[in-house]
Structures are given as C-alpha cells and as structure tokens.
Image: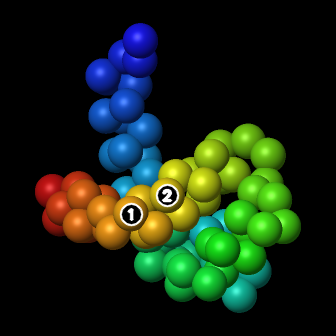
Amino acid sequence: MTNPDLDKNFLLKLAKAKMPYGKYKDRYLIDLPEYYLVWYRNKGFPKGTLGMQLQTIYEIKVNGLEHLIRNIQKM
C-alpha cells in the first residue's frame, strides 16, 4: 500500500519539475512534446528521479490526464 502523502509530494514535485538538459532544458516536464517522451520510452528512461518523472509524465499524457498536473501548477 502506498503512502498518500508520498504520492501527493511526488505529484507536487512533478508539477514543478523542469527538464535539466538538452533541447527542452528548463521546460516543465508536462510541457514536453509527446513524441519526445515516446522517444525516451523506446530508448529507455534515465535512471533515478528524472527517469521516474519522465515515465510518469509519459503515462499521464498517454492517458489524457495533463489537466491533473496543470491544476497543481495553478495552486
């Protein structure tokens, strides 16, 4: 069973997370183009926190749930 506080903190951090390098440096992860996330999905997500965040953003976008992250950003 997951801890709801950990999930909440993860989503809060995810909403504020920005790409640390590359062509999309300093863009919010939720604003990354879907094709870029698909490329990472096929290539393999990076290890660590960034990889977990990118994978989560990929799942959010594939399932049409971007509004959840955008609502958190507005808070």
Q: Quadrant of the N terminus?
A: top left
Residue neighbourhood size for the residue with mark 2, other residues' Cα within 10 Å, grouped as few (<14), some (14–19), many (≥20): some
Q: How is the image coloured?
A: rainbow
Residue that label 2 marks: 59
Q: Is residue 63 visible in the rendered structure shown here?
A: yes
The C terminus is located in which quarter? bottom left
Q: Position of residue 38 (x, y in %)?
A: 66, 74
Residue at 40% across, 25% down:
6
**Residue, x 60% and y 59% (percent of image)?**
54
* Three-letter code for the amino acid on which mark 2 is drawn: Glu
Disc 2 + disc 1, Cβ < 8 Å: yes
Number of the label disc, if any, that sits on residue 18: none
Which residue position is annotated with label 1?
Answer: 63
Quadrant in which residue 40 is drawn = bottom right
Counting from the top left corner in percent of width and height, residue 43 is at: 84, 67
Residue 17 visible in the displayed image: no
* Above or below: residue 6 compared with residue 68: above
